[in-house]
Image: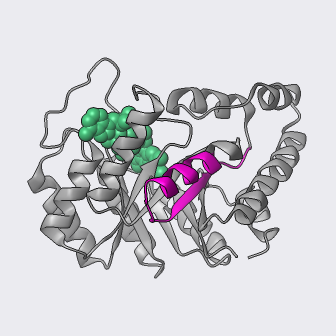
């Protein structure tokens, strides 16, 4: 039985975008999500939009989990941000390292890796926040190898993470293997699969390339075969991702986290077809 679903947004940069997101949030909220998360621009440019978006969503009385990343960030920045979040009733966080701008693999701040930020928040804010971290069933793209990557994931758990949300994937075996690894290593926190609904073939392929999510060759061929048939692609995506969600529930996934890209569809159709 699936315990919870959650939805991810990115912060809009304009007032019109914020207004539209409020409407999107109200529609998605009818599916009774546990929370909405809001991404954070690690490169700096969109960081204040995250706080604005979180504050606007809190006005709708929904539970919000801001993402927070640590590269090029100092402890006092974290303290200030988290105090602001506490003042508007936020008590969940998605804690990440963030991505370096290309070619710059060094931080100007106090943290290098997400586990250090998790440990800092635990030390400074005790258990005021429920901390979620990222997990990569298909391995983080910069990791040396799977075993090292898993050791690094374990470090985040040992630093105090309460839960992990995965990068999206289309190969359920990758998630099953990751769960097995957790079990063998006695990692007991919930590992919630990240779900990417399909609405644009090229955009999905480009983004997957950037973030290291694998698109199986057969799926790539199918996606590209739709060419300009957007409706056909969306329908195909709803079936494929809906089936993936059902299989994940059958496998015992503790929840599903949807990367909505700020759209109600196709997420709403997929969620409404699930047996929850
Ligand atoms: P880490 O856990 O720090 O790992 C990063 C890399 O370093 C991995 O290869 C790991 O194996 C290695 N590593 C970790 N610890 C150590 C160590 N102690 N010593 C040596 N190597 C180590 N990005 C954003 O900019 N904004 C967002 O809002 C955002 N949201 C995301 C949400 C989810 C659910 C996920 C899965 C990713 C998100 N990302 C976001 C992307 C994320 O920032 C990148 O994938 C980033 O490259 C890694 O972040 P992390 O927190 O997983 O890093």
Viewer-proximal residue, 149 or 67?
149
Q: Residue furthest top?
A: 103
Total tally of numbered discs in the picture = 0
Q: Residue 118, how many percent across, how many down?
A: 25, 57
Q: Splitting the image into four quadrants, where does ligand 1 fall?
A: top left
Viewer-proximal residue, 223 or 45?
223
Viewer-proximal residue, 46 or 163?
163
What residue lies at 68% left-to-right and 75% top-to-bottom? Answer: 31
Q: Is residue 225 above or below residue 94?
A: above
- Give the side of residue 204 with respect to residue 266, left or right: left
- Give the side of residue 125 with respect to residue 130, left or right: left
Q: Residue 166, how many percent across, how many down?
A: 52, 50
What residue lies at 21% left-to-right and 38% top-to-bottom? Answer: 112
Q: Quadrant of the N terminus?
A: bottom right
What residue lies at 18% left-to-right and 32% top-to-bottom? Answer: 107
Q: Quadrant of residue 260?
A: bottom right
Q: Quadrant of the C terminus?
A: bottom right
Q: Residue 232, how many percent across, how many down?
A: 90, 41
Q: Quadrant of residue 123?
A: bottom left
- Give the side of residue 230 with respect to residue 203, left or right: right
Q: Residue 255, how many percent across, how many down?
A: 60, 67
Q: Is residue 179 above or below residue 218?
A: below
**Does 23 appear in magenta?**
no
Q: Residue furthest bottom?
A: 61
> Visible in this render: residue 205?
yes
In the image, which residues are magenta? Answer: 175-198
Give the color scheme: rainbow, by chain, secondary structure or one colour.
one colour
Q: Is residue 257 above or below residue 85?
A: above
Q: Residue furthest left?
A: 76
- Give the side of residue 42 with respect to residue 11, left or right: left
> Visible in this render: residue 10?
no
What residue lies at 46% left-to-right and 82% top-to-bottom? Answer: 61
């Amino acid at each position: 039985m699936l315990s919870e679903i959650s939805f991810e947004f990115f912060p809009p940069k304009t007032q019109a975008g914020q207004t539209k997101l409020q409407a999107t949030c109200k529609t998605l909220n009818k599916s009774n999500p546990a929370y909405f998360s809001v991404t954070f621009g690690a490169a700096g440019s969109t960081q204040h939009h995250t706080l604005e978006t979180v504050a606007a969503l809190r006005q709708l009385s929904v539970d919000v989990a801001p993402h927070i990343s640590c590269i090029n960030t100092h402890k006092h920045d974290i303290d200030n941000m988290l105090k602001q979040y506490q003042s508007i009733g936020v008590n969940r966080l998605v804690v990440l390292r963030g991505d370096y701008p290309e070619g710059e693999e060094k931080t100007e701040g106090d943290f290098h890796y997400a586990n250090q930020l998790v440990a800092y928040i635990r030390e400074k804010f005790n258990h005021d926040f429920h901390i979620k971290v990222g997990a990569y069933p298909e391995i983080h793209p910069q990791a040396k190898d799977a075993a090292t990557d898993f050791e690094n994931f374990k470090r985040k758990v040992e630093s105090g993470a309460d839960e992990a949300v995965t990068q999206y994937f289309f190969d359920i075996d990758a998630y099953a293997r990751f769960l097995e690894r957790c079990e063998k290593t006695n990692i007991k926190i919930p590992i919630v699969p990240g779900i990417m609904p399909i609405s644009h073939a090229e955009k999905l392929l480009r983004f997957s390339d950037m973030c290291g999510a694998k698109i199986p060759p057969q799926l790539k061929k199918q996606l590209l075969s739709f060419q300009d048939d957007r409706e056909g692609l969306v329908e195909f995506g709803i079936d494929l991702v809906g089936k993936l969600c059902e299989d994940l529930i059958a496998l015992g996934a503790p929840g599903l986290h949807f990367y909505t890209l700020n759209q109600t569809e196709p997420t709403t159709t997929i969620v409404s077809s699930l047996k929850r």
